[in-house]
Amino acid sequence: MPDIDKIDRRILSVLQVEGRIAAVELAERIGLSPTTTGERLKRLQKDGYIEGFGARLAPQRLGFGLLVFVEVLLDKTTPDVFDRFAQAIRRAPEVLECHMVAGGFDYLVKTRVADMAAYRRFLGDVLLPLPGVRETRTYAVMEEVKNDAPLPL
């Protein structure tokens, strides 16, 4: 990791697990003054090492109990088709993540919906009509084994 040192890594490691930690407690934990810690934190944010802060929500409690991964195969693999698909999928609020991948398909989409009926509506109304979509394969998650891993700093 260029431009960051061991102390910056310790700050980032703590923040990955405890994003709401008080600045004073963070400073104590890493062994720096609150002022110095605050300056480092601002720099890490400004330099793009910290993309933001947020709360981890309980999807089941909020009516999003079904996690689904979908392989998407496009009809052509040309830059314009990739661009049109990417622009369209970014506008779909149901899509949590979308990754262009190498291998037997083009994109891996991650979505959360209420149940299988809601997924069927998402597939038919949102995903299949996207530009360039030729084929999809759906993988409904039966159990989330690990979903909170911090980066190995």
Image (cartoon, helix red, strand yellow):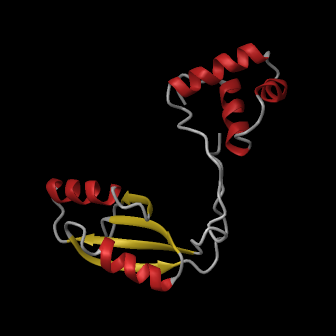
> With 69 as the anchor, is 131 left or right in this view?
left
Instruction: Name the residue at 77% across, 18% down.
Output: 34
- Location of residue 62 by image quarter: bottom right
Q: Residue furthest bottom?
A: 117
- Location of residue 27 by image quarter: top right
Instruction: Name the residue at 32% across, 71% down.
Output: 126
- Residue 48 place in picture, x, y as percent: 50, 30
Instruction: Name the residue at 69% across, 38% down.
Output: 15
> With 17 as the anchor, is 52 left or right in this view?
left
Asked if residue 30 is positioned above or below residue 119 in the image, the reply reads above
- Residue 92 place in picture, x, y as percent: 36, 61
> With 25 as the anchor, is 144 left or right in this view?
left
- Residue 131 place in picture, x, y as percent: 20, 66
- Which sits in the foreground, 103 or 81? 81
Instruction: Name the residue at 73% across, 39% down.
Output: 20
- Residue 94 place in picture, x, y as percent: 43, 65
Task: Count numbered badges in the picture.
Answer: 0
Q: Quadrant of the C terminus?
A: top right
Asked if residue 15 is positioned above or below residue 133 in the image, the reply reads above
Q: Residue furthest front?
A: 62
Q: Quadrant of the N terminus?
A: top right
> With 35 as the anchor, is 109 left or right in this view?
left
